[in-house]
């Protein structure tokens, strides 16, 4: 590849941490293989599956892939960290085993980076889908964030006040690799906010680029952390808000009040949504 072509089609590492993911693994991998972006490196790490996922990874041959296997019980953060360490691309996208990428996801966010080279992390919207794949909410995320380049400070402040994850799960996010790897490890002291605490480390130092377009889908089901333990999610989001506030340095009394009220509002809406979905049998 010439230097010119590399500039236009930089290598993207798609990293997939797996643990007992056989139920949706084929769908997730099909969405990755269907990307219209031509320069992709695939990294798959199994964290000790006992449902056949480990053997699936060993036998995966659809495209060249870096494969690794962790000791059972290593935990999500260790798996996400190992995936990220193995990536060698210019940019990195982590995709969880039950989520989906839409065909132009990689090309869209690479273009965002090329258009805004100051950015070190890229956010986009995503759709929320049921366990069966039905779209429940379209174009979720990026509330309070203008499209294009935004400062890390303004992105952190918007997330702090919002009371919800405006950045999205990892399938909606892309990282500049060097910056991402310098922020490792992923940490799961607050497991529901594993992703958001990591984003904060980057936004604390670097600007982001935002796209108001759905580039993938986040699947919710009865097995999702946030469907089972809403009160813990609320508590951990409060911890994230405290961390964000310390990084911001100064927040007003009004902003603190809005942040608290919006966290409570989000928790109430989440309870109502999961109750409604459960009654409609959309979780399975």
Image (cartoon, rainbow, N blue to C red):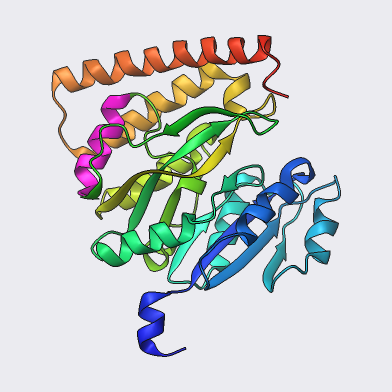
User: What residue is rendered at 27% in x and 59% in y?
Assistant: 119
Please name the predominant secondary structure of the magenta segment in the image.
helix
Q: Quadrant of residue 125?
A: top left
User: What residue is rendered at 80% in x and 51% in y?
Assistant: 53
Report the side of 142 relative to 276 (left or right). left
Report the side of 90 relative to 72 (left or right). left
Q: Quadrant of residue 113?
A: bottom left
Vertical comparison of 173 with 38: above or below: above
Q: x%, y% of residue 142?
A: 33, 37
Is-magenta flag for residue 193?
no
Vertical comparison of 222 with 150: above or below: above
Q: x%, y% of residue 85?
A: 54, 65
Is-magenta flag for residue 157?
yes
Depth order, front residue of 269/251: 269
The residue range painted magenta reads 150-162
User: What residue is rendered at 35% in x and 23% in y?
Assistant: 163
Q: x%, y% of residue 46?
A: 72, 55
- Examine the rendering and report whether any part of residue 123 can be seen: yes
Q: x%, y% of residue 43?
A: 63, 65
Q: Residue pushed farthest bottom?
A: 2
Depth order, front residue of 117/194: 117
Count of marks, rendered view: 0
User: What residue is rendered at 47% in x and 59% in y?
Assistant: 106
Vertical comparison of 261 with 24: above or below: above
Q: Quadrant of the C terminus?
A: top right
Q: Quadrant of residue 197?
A: top left
Depth order, front residue of 268/280: 280
Depth order, front residue of 162/142: 142
Report the side of 156 relative to 123 (left or right). left
- Examine the rendering and report whether any part of residue 180 can be seen: no
């Amino acid at each position: 590849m010439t230097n010119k072509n590399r500039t236009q089609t930089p290598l993207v590492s798609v990293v997939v941490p797996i643990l007992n993911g056989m139920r949706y693994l084929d769908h997730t991998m099909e969405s990755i293989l269907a990307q219209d972006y031509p320069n992709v490196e695939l990294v798959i790490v199994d964290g000790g599956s006992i449902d056949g996922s480990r053997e699936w990874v060993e036998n995966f041959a659809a495209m060249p892939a870096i494969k690794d296997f962790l000791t059972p019980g290593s935990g999500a953060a260790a798996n996400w960290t190992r995936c990220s360490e193995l990536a060698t691309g210019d940019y990195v996208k982590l995709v969880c085993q039950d989520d989906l990428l839409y065909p132009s996801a990689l090309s869209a966010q690479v273009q965002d980076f090329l258009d805004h080279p100051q950015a070190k992390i890229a956010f986009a919207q995503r759709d929320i889908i049921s366990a069966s794949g039905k779209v429940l909410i379209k174009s979720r995320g990026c509330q309070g964030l203008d499209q294009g380049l935004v400062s890390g400070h303004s992105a952190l402040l918007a997330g702090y006040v919002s009371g919800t994850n405006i950045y999205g799960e990892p399938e909606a996010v892309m990282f500049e690799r060097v910056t991402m790897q310098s922020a490792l490890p992923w940490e799961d002291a607050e497991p529901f906010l594993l992703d958001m605490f990591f984003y904060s480390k980057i936004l604390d130092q670097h600007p982001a680029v935002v796209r108001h377009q759905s580039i993938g889908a986040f699947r919710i089901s009865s097995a999702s952390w946030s469907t089972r333990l809403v009160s813990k999610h609320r508590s951990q989001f409060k911890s994230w808000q405290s961390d964000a506030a310390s990084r911001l340095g100064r927040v007003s009394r009004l902003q603190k009040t809005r942040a608290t009220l919006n966290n409570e509002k989000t928790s109430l809406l989440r309870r109502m949504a999961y109750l409604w979905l459960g009654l409609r049998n959309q979780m399975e």
